[in-house]
Image (cartoon, rainbow, N blue to C red):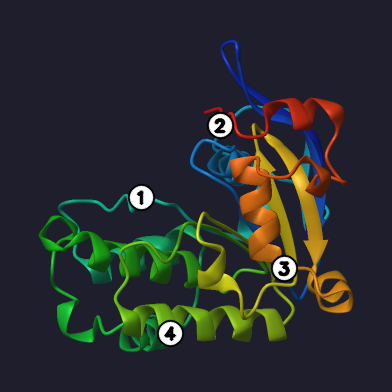
Amino acid sequence: MIEVKNVTKKYGKLLANDDLSFTVHPGEISILVGPNGAGKSTIIKSIAGLLRFQGEILICGKKNKSMDAKRNLGYIPEIPALYDMLTIWEHMEFIARAYSLENWKERADSLFERFELSDKKNKLGSELSKGMQQKVSICCGLLPNPKVILFDEPLVGLDPHAIKELKNILVEYKTDGAAILLSTHMLDSVSEFWDSTNIMMGGKFAARRTRKEVLGSGEDLEKLFFDITEGTKDNTLQSASTTDRKIVGKEKP
């Protein structure tokens, strides 16, 4: 489970996340959508323990920067950060040692097979295309079989087979009870499997919906998204505050 409580993050005078609170339950895929600069990556990085922030974040009931929390957390960043002089198999070994994993090689082989990396085990990180690096990053994040997974724009740069495989894996983890938070600016790319959606603008939630709510009301989520992010209809912002309404249509970093 992910619990975010009153999290605020500033870069100097710039307010990137403004008093955010939300929960991602076990067996739930929650997505963050919004234009570039809405604050999606900032809250993901804060949850991952990479940024300082005001507020509280819990992973499976433990403070997110604690070792207990990190053992349950998998993080796949937007931009892969591989070691240039390690082979991709050595990347997996590095993760296995960091997490003190046992009998990890069979799982690593399975992930490599699913992402068509089996014939590239001895390739260095610096020799791979961005799409290949993204695949390796996903494999590294999933190797410890985490209970909580953070994906920041995971589909960018992937080929169609890898996109299909990643979507299958997301559903598998959901079925197994993992809590998954995924950020994207492409709503249609995740439309088939999300459970809750958070539309961000200016560091806040402009709207929040569950799949059950959308199916029950017949609301067009994509239309709501564009109404909010492009500021075409103020009356769609029923869940936004007065401050939110003032910033609609004015994207902030």
Quarter of image, res 220: bottom right
- Front disc: 2 or 4: 2
Q: Residue at x 79, y 73 (%)?
A: 211
Q: Which residue is mark 4?
A: 165
Secondary element at tag 4: helix
For marks 1 and 2 on the same chain, the one whose residue lies earlier in the sequence: 1
For marks 4 and 3 on the same chain, the one whose residue lies earlier in the sequence: 4
Question: Disc 1 marks which amino acid?
Answer: Ile
Question: Disc 4 marks which amino acid?
Answer: Glu
Crowding near the residue tagged with mark 1, few <14, some 14–19, many ≥20 C-alpha atoms within 10 Å: some
Residue 251's disc is: 2
Q: Residue at x 76, y 31 (%)?
A: 244
- Pointer 4 and pointer 3: residues touching (CB < 8 Å)? no
- Cα–Cα span, label 2 and label 3: 22 Å
Secondary element at tag 3: loop
Q: Which residue is mark 1?
A: 79
Question: Disc 3 marks which amino acid?
Answer: Asp
- Pointer 1 and pointer 2: residues touching (CB < 8 Å)? no
Q: Residue at x 57, y 74 (%)?
A: 145
Crowding near the residue tagged with mark 4, few <14, some 14–19, many ≥20 C-alpha atoms within 10 Å: few
For marks 1 and 4 on the same chain, the one whose residue lies earlier in the sequence: 1
Question: Disc 2 marks which amino acid?
Answer: Glu
Residue 201, position in %: x, y? 65, 38
- Cα–Cα span, label 1 and label 4: 19 Å
